[in-house]
Image: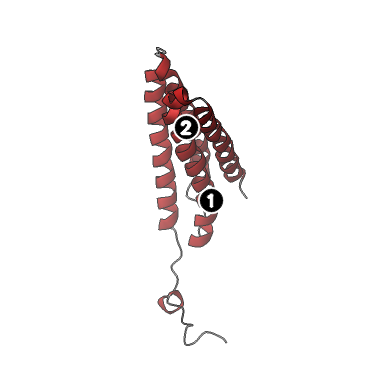
């Protein structure tokens, strides 16, 4: 497994802890429901998206029988996505208190999250372009006529 894949999976698990911690805090102290956007983004962009990215970066090249288009872009995606999400969560936690930097954190974090998602989509799209096609009879579950038995 590539180190960046492991890092995506570990980041996913860390975001799961953060998201469920915020969720439990809201359940214990209902006025903290103002932090719901931080809770949701931690779980959706953090846990779910990082898990999907880690698994996809590991599995898609194997399914496509092709190398990943750019491992370097995948590493950049890891950094950009986690930095963006960290800024977004900080902004969502600061906004109910009127912190002056909250809107800036949300804006920068949102743009970084967008760039990370686009990097992910581009990298996998280009990887799928390299896919080795499977002959039609095999793809439909039938062996080739001249294939050895």
Residue at horizontal 47%, vertical 50%? 69
User: Looking at the image, can residue 81 be seen?
Assistant: yes
Q: Give how far across and how far down residue 114 sits, in percent.
A: 38, 35
| Relative height, residue 101 to residue 71 (above, below) | above
Decide: few, some or many residues near mark 1? Use Cα within 10 Å; few <14, some 14-19, many ≥20: some
Residue occupying the point 54% across, 59% down: 62
Q: Residues within 10 Å of mark 2 (few under 14, many from 20)?
A: many
Residue under label 2: 39
- The C terminus, quarter of image: bottom right
Residue at the location (53% across, 28% down)? 28
Position of residue 132 relative to residue 99, above or below, is below
- Judged by depth in the image, the label closer to the viewer, 1 or 2, is 2
Q: Quadrant of residue 103?
A: top left
* SS of the residue under disc 1: helix
Near-viewer residue (131 or 4) = 4
- x and y percent of residue 74 in the render? 50, 42
Return the x and y of residue 30 as percentages of the image width and height.
Answer: 47, 26
Q: Position of residue 68 (x, y in %)?
A: 50, 51
Q: How many marks?
A: 2
In screen coordinates, is 80 left or right of 3? left
Residue 65 visible in this rendered orientation of the protein: no
Q: Which corner quadrant of the image does residue 100 belong to?
A: top left
Q: CA distance from mark 1 to mark 2?
A: 23 Å
Compared with 60, 47 (above or below) is: above
Q: Earlier in the sequence, mark 1 or mark 2?
A: 2
Q: What residue is disc 1 on?
A: 55
Q: Residue at x 45, y 40 (%)?
A: 44
């Amino acid at each position: 497994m590539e180190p960046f894949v492991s890092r995506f999976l570990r980041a996913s698990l860390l975001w799961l802890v953060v998201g469920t911690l915020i969720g439990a805090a809201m359940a214990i102290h209902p006025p903290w429901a103002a932090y719901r956007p931080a809770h949701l983004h931690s779980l959706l962009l953090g846990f779910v998206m990082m898990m999907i990215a880690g698994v996809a970066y590991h599995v898609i090249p194997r399914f496509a029988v092709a190398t990943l288009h750019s491992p370097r872009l995948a590493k950049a995606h890891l950094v950009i996505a986690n930095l963006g999400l960290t800024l977004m969560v900080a902004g969502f936690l600061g906004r109910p208190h009127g912190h002056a930097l909250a809107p800036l954190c949300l804006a920068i974090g949102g743009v970084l999250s967008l760039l990370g998602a686009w990097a992910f989509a581009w990298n996998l799209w280009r990887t799928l372009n390299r896919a080795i096609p499977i002959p039609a009879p095999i793809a439909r579950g039938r062996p080739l006529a001249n294939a050895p038995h």
